Structure formats: structure tokens, C-alpha cells
């Protein structure tokens, strides 16, 4: 009974994650090989707050993958699905989210087999199971431990993996304290994820992943009362991408002396 209550609580908190972050989940997209320049289009839709464009881009990626069966494209597609599902949940479009999640889990299983259980894909699978918990809390008793096992195994396999740190952070930040949650420890994982990205191509290539990860850390700071640290990160994001007007309007404008 205690296990069931724990996973119901965690499922509720995971839904709150999506709402608090305002946008989408965190996605370590690979550098594509052309493929219609999908990653650049995703970035532009992100900074312009035009998330509705992602459905069309996903459709195009699916069509191209079915023609080419390209592994790099499949990698990008799986993580793009993850981001889009997060957005759908935040908009309370549960039917569409469930449909996309079904497709994402099928394709991620194919990717997992192709990459032989690689850590970043394993962490993604754990995160997708987390979405399943959000959308169907009655699966929590069975699926919850599986999600945590995937995430922990991924992190233990490669602690320098960006999204492994993110998912460990999410697990610690949104798990109730009585069940092992620790916001301070979570922030350490988020900080490490940002540190990894600071020297990665995801930053130099103007990928939205860098921005979103910094904002995730800023949200964590804000949640624990470290407002100034959060404001410093909002400023950092705007220096990186001045065109992200929603960051200035919805986040940075609330900082003191702005």
C-alpha cells in the first residue's frame, strides 16, 4: 500500500514539473545530418514560443525516417517526441499526449536495440515511463520502480551524460522528501547538466536544449528561494538569445531592479 501511495504522489508531482517549467521537457538532441534542418526549426519555434509547429516537424521527421531508416534521425525523432509530449501535458491535451507517447515508446525501443541500451537512451526510456505515470496514475505501482531503475542505471553507467543528470535531478527534486527527495541534491545534478552543456556543441550550435536546461536550473533555484541566482540565469539566457522575448516578459521581468 505504501508503494502505491508513493507512486501516486510522484505521478502528481511529475505533472507539476511540466506545468512549472512552462515549456517542455529536456531533450539531448543529436547533431543531425541535414534532414530538413529539423533541429534549427525546433530551436526557432522554441525561442519564438511557437510550440504548435512541433507537430508538423515531427510528422516530417517520421516520413523521412520511414523512407531512410536513418539512426541519427531516429535519435532526434525520439527526443523530439519527448519534448512535444511534455508540451501537450502542460496544455492538458491528454489524448494527444497519450497518442504521441505510444509512438515515442515504440520508436525509442527500436533506438534502444540499435544502440544496445546506451545510457542516454535508457534515461530517455525512464523519462517516457515517467510521462506514462503522469497520464495514467494507476500504472504507478508497476511502472514507477521501472522508471527509477532506468534512470539510475543510466546515470551510474555515465555520470557525465547530460540527460542522465537532468533525470536524476528531476527524480530528486520532485520526489516527496519522506520518500527520499532532496531539492539541494537535485540542484547539484542540474548544475552538472548545465556545466556539461557549457562546453558542448548544443550550446555553440544554438540548440534550444542549452537554453531550456539553464531555465530548468533557474526554476529549481526559484523553488528553493534563491531568487537572485535564478535571475542571473534568466539574464544569461537573454544574452545567449536576445530574441527569446517570452523569457524577458514572463521570467526576467519579475526580477528586482529590471
Image (cartoon, rainbow, N blue to C red):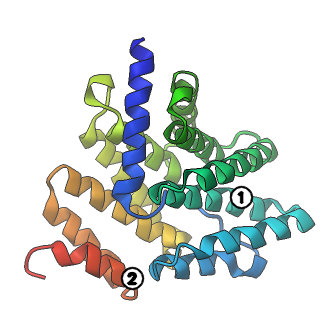
Q: Secondary structure under badge 1?
A: helix
Q: Tell me which residue sits at (45%, 19%) in the image.
A: 4
Question: Which residue is outermost to the right?
Answer: 67
Q: Tell me which residue sits at (53%, 25%) in the image.
A: 145
Q: Tell me which residue sits at (68%, 51%) in the image.
A: 99
Q: Is residue 33 above or below residue 84?
A: below
Question: Which residue is outermost to the left?
Answer: 257
| Label 2 neighbour load within 10 Å: few <14, some 14-19, many 20+ | some
Question: Which residue is outermost to the top?
Answer: 1
Q: Which numbered disc flags the more N-terminal residue, 1 or 2?
A: 1
Q: Is residue 215 left or right of residue 70?
A: left
Q: How many marks?
A: 2
| Label 1 neighbour load within 10 Å: few <14, some 14-19, many 20+ | many
Q: CA distance from mark 1 to mark 2?
A: 26 Å
Q: Position of residue 32 (x, y in %)?
A: 71, 72
Query: What mark, if any, has residue 75 been given in the picture?
Result: 1
Amino acid at each position: 500500500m505504501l508503494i502505491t501511495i508513493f507512486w501516486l504522489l510522484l505521478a502528481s508531482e511529475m505533472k507539476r514539473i511540466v506545468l512549472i517549467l512552462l515549456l517542455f521537457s529536456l531533450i539531448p538532441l543529436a547533431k543531425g545530418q541535414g534532414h530538413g534542418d529539423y533541429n534549427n526549426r525546433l530551436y526557432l519555434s522554441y525561442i519564438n514560443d511557437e510550440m504548435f509547429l512541433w507537430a508538423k516537424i515531427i510528422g516530417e521527421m517520421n516520413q523521412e525516417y520511414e523512407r531512410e531508416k536513418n539512426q541519427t534521425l531516429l535519435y532526434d525523432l525520439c527526443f523530439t517526441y519527448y519534448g512535444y509530449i511534455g508540451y501537450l501535458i502542460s496544455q492538458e491535451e491528454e489524448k494527444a499526449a497519450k497518442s504521441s507517447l505510444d509512438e515515442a515508446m515504440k520508436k525509442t525501443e527500436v533506438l534502444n536495440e540499435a544502440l544496445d541500451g546506451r545510457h542516454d537512451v535508457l534515461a530517455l526510456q525512464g523519462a517516457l515511463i515517467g510521462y506514462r505515470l503522469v497520464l495514467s496514475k494507476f500504472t504507478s505501482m508497476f511502472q514507477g520502480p521501472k522508471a527509477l531503475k532506468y534512470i539510475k542505471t543510466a546515470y551510474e553507467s555515465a555520470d557525465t551524460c547530460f540527460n542522465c543528470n537532468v533525470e536524476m535531478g528531476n527524480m530528486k527534486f520532485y520526489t516527496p522528501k519522506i520518500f527520499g527527495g532532496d531539492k539541494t541534491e537535485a540542484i547539484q545534478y542540474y548544475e552538472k547538466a548545465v556545466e556539461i552543456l557549457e562546453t558542448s556543441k548544443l550550446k555553440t550550435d544554438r540548440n534550444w536544449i542549452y537554453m531550456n536546461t539553464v531555465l530548468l536550473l533557474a526554476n529549481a533555484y526559484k523553488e528553493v528561494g534563491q531568487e537572485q541566482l535564478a535571475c542571473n540565469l534568466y539574464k544569461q539566457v537573454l544574452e545567449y538569445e536576445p530574441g527569446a522575448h517570452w523569457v524577458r516578459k514572463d521570467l526576467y521581468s519579475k526580477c528586482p531592479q529590471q
